[in-house]
């Protein structure tokens, strides 16, 4: 469990943030936040998540998701609306990066490229992608074209 402080969280008396392993009773909050955030809802297992609480209130989450080819993905990083813009997602990511072996992969909307580059991730070419990420990339690219999305999906890697 980790504790730190955020400044300026509007409407919350306590700005002490607790990061802790998720518990079974957190699953409904995790699933709801992932849906509202429009993040890939597959592979949501509470055992892999870290949960952020502010003033005892569920504020965000993230996970390290394993794939069948042995790779590991930084995934499901999401923060509840009232707590966004305060650095909470970055704290969740730093916490998970401290637990993750390298290489570590992630997939995100192209608009988030700069955010993840701050943590050392780089965009991968299709030829570099491991099998699990290549499958996801091809499927997402087809769906994004079908639904005329303006952004694209990026597969990024952190290698050191």
Image: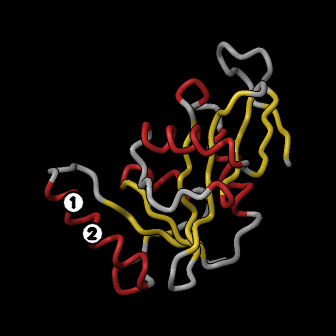
- Who's the residue at 53% across and 28% down the image? 81
State the image quarter where residue 125 is shown.
Answer: bottom left
- Horizontal arrangement in the rendering, residue 67 relative to residue 56 (left or right): left
- Who's the residue at 27% across and 52% down the image? 151
Which residue is nearer to you in this view: 155 or 31?
31
Number of marks present in the image shown? 2
Packing grade of label 1 (10 A; few <14, some 14-19, many >=20) is few
Q: Mark 2 highlights which residue?
A: 139
- Horizontal arrangement in the rendering, residue 20 relative to residue 43 (left or right): right
- Who's the residue at 57% across and 32% down the image? 85
- Horizontal arrangement in the rendering, residue 57 relative to residue 115 (left or right): right
Q: Secondary structure at mark 2?
A: helix
Q: Secondary structure at mark 1?
A: helix
- Who's the residue at 68% across and 21% down the image? 9
User: Answer yes or no: do the residues labelled 2 and 1 have beta carbons within 8 Å?
Assistant: yes
- Horizontal arrangement in the rendering, residue 66 relative to residue 26 (left or right): left
Q: Position of residue 115 (x, y in %)?
A: 52, 51
State the image quarter where residue 40 is shown.
Answer: bottom left
Q: Mark 1 highlights which residue?
A: 143
Q: Position of residue 41 (x, y in %)?
A: 44, 53
Packing grade of label 2 (10 A; few <14, some 14-19, many >=20) is few
Which residue is nearer to you in this view: 113 or 74?
74
Could you tell me which quadrant the C terminus lies in?
bottom right
Location of residue 34 with respect to 81 vertically, above or below:
below
Which residue is nearer to you in this view: 88 or 78?
78
What is the CA distance from the residue labelled 2 to the residue labelled 1? 6 Å
């Amino acid at each position: 469990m980790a504790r730190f402080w955020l400044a300026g969280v509007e409407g919350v008396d306590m700005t002490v943030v607790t990061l802790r392993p998720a518990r079974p009773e957190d699953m409904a909050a995790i699933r709801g936040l992932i849906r509202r955030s429009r993040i890939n809802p597959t592979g949501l297992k509470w055992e892999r998540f870290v949960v952020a609480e502010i003033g005892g209130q569920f504020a965000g989450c993230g996970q390290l998701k394993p794939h069948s080819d042995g790779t590991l993905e930084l995934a499901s990083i999401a923060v509840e609306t009232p707590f966004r813009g305060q650095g909470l997602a970055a704290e969740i990511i730093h916490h998970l990066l401290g637990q993750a072996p390298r290489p570590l992969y992630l997939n995100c909307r192209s608009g988030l490229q700069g955010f993840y580059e701050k943590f050392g991730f780089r965009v991968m070419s299709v030829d570099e992608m491991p099998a699990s990420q290549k499958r996801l990339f091809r499927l997402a690219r087809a769906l994004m074209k079908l639904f005329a999305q303006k952004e694209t999906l990026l597969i990024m890697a952190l290698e050191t």
